[in-house]
Amino acid sequence: MRRMAGTRLIQWLNLLVWALVMLKTEGANVSITIVKDAVAKGAVCLDGSPPAYHWDKGFGAGINNWLVHIEGGGWCNNVTLCLNRSETRLGSSKHMDKAVNFTGILSRVQNYNPDFYNWNRIKIRYCDGASFTGDVEAVDPDTNLHFRGARIWPAVIEDLLSKGMKDAKNAFLSGNSAGGLASILHCDSFRALIPSGAKVKCLSDAGYFINVMAGTRLIQWLNLLVWALVMLKTEGANVSITIVKDAVAKGAVCLDGSPPAYHWDKGFGAGINNWLVHIEGGGWCNNVTLCLNRSETRLGSSKHMDKAVNFWDSE
Ligand SMILES: *[C@@H]1O[C@H](CO)[C@@H](O)[C@H](O)[C@H]1NC(C)=O
Ligand SMILES: *[C@@H]1O[C@H](CO)[C@@H](O)[C@H](O)[C@H]1NC(C)=O
Ligand SMILES: *[C@@H]1O[C@H](CO)[C@@H](O)[C@H](O)[C@H]1NC(C)=O
Ligand SMILES: *[C@@H]1O[C@H](CO)[C@@H](O)[C@H](O)[C@H]1NC(C)=O
Ligand SMILES: *[C@@H]1O[C@H](CO)[C@@H](O)[C@H](O)[C@H]1NC(C)=O
Ligand SMILES: *[C@@H]1O[C@H](CO)[C@@H](O)[C@H](O)[C@H]1NC(C)=O
Ligand SMILES: *[C@@H]1O[C@H](CO)[C@@H](O)[C@H](O)[C@H]1NC(C)=O
């Protein structure tokens, strides 16, 4: 009986600890900042509402470091779609949540985000439908659509500068998807807007899009050709395998006893002393049947590995 009570108590304590951990790790509730001043500069969302961002202040050693993340969300490419979008959070600050949770690279929890947890972390809300590129003065009175994303970008950055980013030691622009494209397009301008003493980097997460199927048939073929040439030029390295034969003497072998292996594309120029070591994935085998099967594949034996791989689709 006493034992049971102890167990029950421990169950409750576990539940409490779990709830507290959840609150601490996921409960960050970052309220929205509407950049009202931007409207006077014509920097507005699709529907004419002011742009917005969320800002979780830096603390401790991160107080002068700034991570600016651009939200993604596809694009609208004609009036019908943009009009529809202008009535959603992706086209109007009127429809945005008043607070969001910051997770991943935006998390303030050190365990989840060891590099940036104590930085100033900003999420710029995406509301122009075009990766912050439009700069059209005219507004069609029938639709009231504003294509002004290129004005939102500096307006938001200037607001952040006035709130302390002008003292940044490190500034990091990131974004994913449509926001990843924005991070490519605006990286130079970000560098130019941040004080020259600061270290500035940009990261584009899934932000490189090749518009293979757009346009007329001829343009489609030209795009495909350009795409193929780009692929060949930038990604066509054909990296041969190095079998680590010496490893066998150390008993360091693959599932089938064959030597381990890697592919190495040598650094060059300024990168010659920099090394990126990437470990291939491929699941696991968790019993003899599966491991035996695997030992006859490239995931279990260097005998079955390709003699050369391209370094762009090797995952
Ligand atoms: C934010 O996190 C809290 C706590 O985990 C959760 O209840 C809430 O639904 C989340 N809000 C959003 C908008 O995801
Ligand atoms: C987050 O904050 C908003 C207002 O700032 C509030 O309405 C909401 O209930 C809060 N949500 C949580 C999960 O704390
Ligand atoms: C707008 O684009 C969508 C998707 O490309 C298409 O389905 C739709 O027919 C287009 N509408 C107009 C009016 O062009
Ligand atoms: C219009 O927006 C709604 C969401 O607000 C969406 O469910 C719907 O699919 C959209 N329609 C078009 C044609 O994109
Ligand atoms: C890559 O190199 C291997 C040998 O090193 C060769 O057999 C193969 O055809 C080459 N593939 C391409 C796409 O260049
Ligand atoms: C090995 O694991 C797989 C997947 O978990 C399972 O389907 C299979 O029955 C297992 N085989 C043996 C011999 O345990
Ligand atoms: C055994 O490996 C082959 C590939 O070599 C795969 O197609 C098959 O599904 C595998 N069987 C099991 C039981 O995992």
Image (cartoon, rainbow, N blue to C red):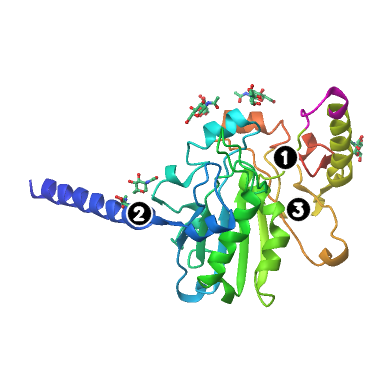
Residue drawn at the location 25% of the way across and 51% of the way down: 14
Q: Is residue 213 magenta?
A: yes
Answer yes or no: do the residues labelled 3 and 1 have beta carbons within 8 Å? no
Q: Is residue 206 left or right of residue 215?
A: left
Which numbered circle lies on residue 209? 1
User: What's under tag 3, amino acid-wise?
Assistant: Ala
For the residues labelled 1 and 2, the Cα–Cα distance comes to 34 Å
Q: Quadrant of the N terminus?
A: top left
The 10 Å Cα crowd at callout 1, few under 14, some 14 to 19, many 20 or more, is few
Mark 2 residue's CB less than 8 Å from ligand 1: yes
User: What's under tag 1, amino acid-wise?
Assistant: Phe
Q: Is residue 217 visible?
A: yes
The 10 Å Cα crowd at callout 3, few under 14, some 14 to 19, many 20 or more, is some
Would you name the residue on which mark 3 appears?
Answer: 247
**Where in the image, quadrant-wise, is ligand 5 located?**
top right
Would you name the residue on which mark 2 appears?
Answer: 27
- Eyeballing the image, is 82 above or below 114? above
Question: Which range of residues does the magenta coloring cover?
Answer: 212-219
- Eyeballing the image, is 272 above or below 210? below
Residue 86, percent from left and from top? 52, 37
Q: Is residue 286 left or right of residue 132?
A: left
Who is closer to the viewer here, 166 or 143?
A: 143
Residue drawn at the location 62% of the way across and 35% of the way down: 76
Residue 31, percent from left and from top? 39, 56
Residue drawn at the location 70% of the way across and 51% of the way down: 252
Q: Is residue 192 left or right of residue 46?
A: right
Q: Helix, strand, or loop for circle 3?
A: helix
The 10 Å Cα crowd at callout 2, few under 14, some 14 to 19, many 20 or more, is some
* Most frequent secondary structure within the magenta stretch: loop
For the residues labelled 3 and 2, the Cα–Cα distance comes to 48 Å
Who is closer to the viewer here, 305 or 69?
A: 69
